[in-house]
Image: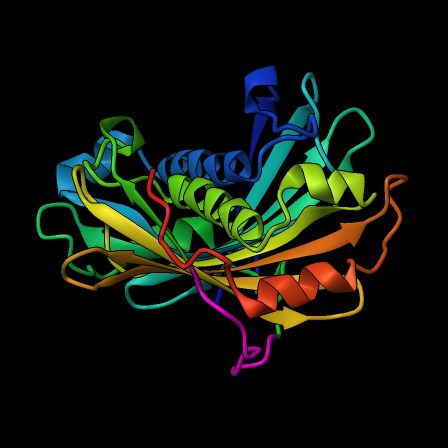
Amino acid sequence: MATAAQTYTRSFRVRAYECDLLGHLNNAVYHHFVEETSGEAWGAANDGPDWYRSRDEAWAIQQVSIGYLHPAVAGDTLDVVTWVSEWGECHARREYEIRRWPHREEIARASARWLHVDRVTGQPSPVPPELVAALGADGRVALEPHRLPAQGLAAASYRWRHQVKRYELDSTGRVNGAIYLSWIEEAKFRAAEEAGWPLERMRAERFLTVQVRHDTEYLRPALYGDEVEVVSRLHDLRHVRGTWLHEVYRVGSGELLARDYSTGAFLDPEGRLARAPRAMLKAVLRGPANLASPSA
């Protein structure tokens, strides 16, 4: 393994339409930043995208973990710094630090596994040795794996269905990875509503949840016209944190398309860590009052 790793930096300006109801940069947009920076970083090591197209090769994201440290807001300028920490025969792992100007405050970290594929067949393809030599690797990891119990809580499952729209596809004709995070966010809020705890009630009870990290694995692509079902259940509970397990299935075939562990922290209105209301946790674990599955 090479000891010197080439780093690449891409700057982004946060737009108002990229922010959520709290005025914070939406979680899915961080995924877009990671993908965009990675695409440029791969190309910077050779002759750019044309080098990959001429060889009918590409990179496909298999797994990504994003840890959110501080919120970004509209008008912020963010630098995404990336480097390769590990090479395999047909894969590489990239690390990411996201910093805010002008003080270079670190607001997020990420780690992603990328698969090198044949663009025509979609099958794994060996990484070109010259790419490994050009980019190097140093083994420094930005975000460690999330340590969660293999066996989750005895919790009820919630189901939300959605039909894939054309605007959710990227240039590969598949649903973009960041879109899954948007589905998961919707499924989580729908689950809370079914349990009797909509966002309005949470605010009335003087607490809220903020995302701490996402750990997402992409197994099969979702395509235009597919109906997908997100099955969600509370997987782990700590004093001031909780983790949901979301599994995305293709309706009909039952294929598992993606799996995500979504970890959030409970806060009081002043932004201090706090325990969630016991009544809410009991309701979420017990399950929806109406067992009918809502549809989009």
Residue at screen point 28% across, 58% down: 249
* The quadrant where residue 147 appears: bottom right
Would residue 219 appear left or right of 245 to someone viewing this image?
left
| Residue 150 located within the stretch drawn in magenta | yes
Closest to the observer, 155 or 84:
155
Q: Position of residue 22 (x, y in %)?
A: 70, 30
Would residue 98 appear left or right of 290 to someone viewing this image?
right
Asked whether the viewer can see residue 146, the reply is: no
Q: Which residues are magenta?
A: 148-158
* The quadrant where residue 286 appears: bottom right
Residue at screen point 59% across, 26% down: 11
Q: Position of residue 99 (x, y in %)?
A: 70, 36
What colour scheme governs how the chains and residues are painted in the rendered image of this protein?
rainbow
Q: Position of residue 258 (x, y in %)?
A: 35, 58
25 relative to 117, above or below: above
Image mark count = 0
| Residue 203 located within the stretch drawn in magenta | no
Magenta span: chief secondary structure: loop
* The quadrant where residue 252 appears: bottom left
Closest to the observer, 286 or 246:
286
11 relative to 5, above or below: above
Locate the C terminus and report the quarter of the image it occupies. Answer: top left
Residue at screen point 38% across, 37% down: 39
Asked whether the viewer can see residue 20, the reply is: yes
Q: Most extreme residue toward the front, as rendered?
A: 290
233 relative to 154, above or below: above
Closest to the observer, 31 or 247:
247
Q: Position of residue 191 (x, y in %)?
A: 51, 52
Q: Most extreme residue toward the left, as rendered?
A: 120
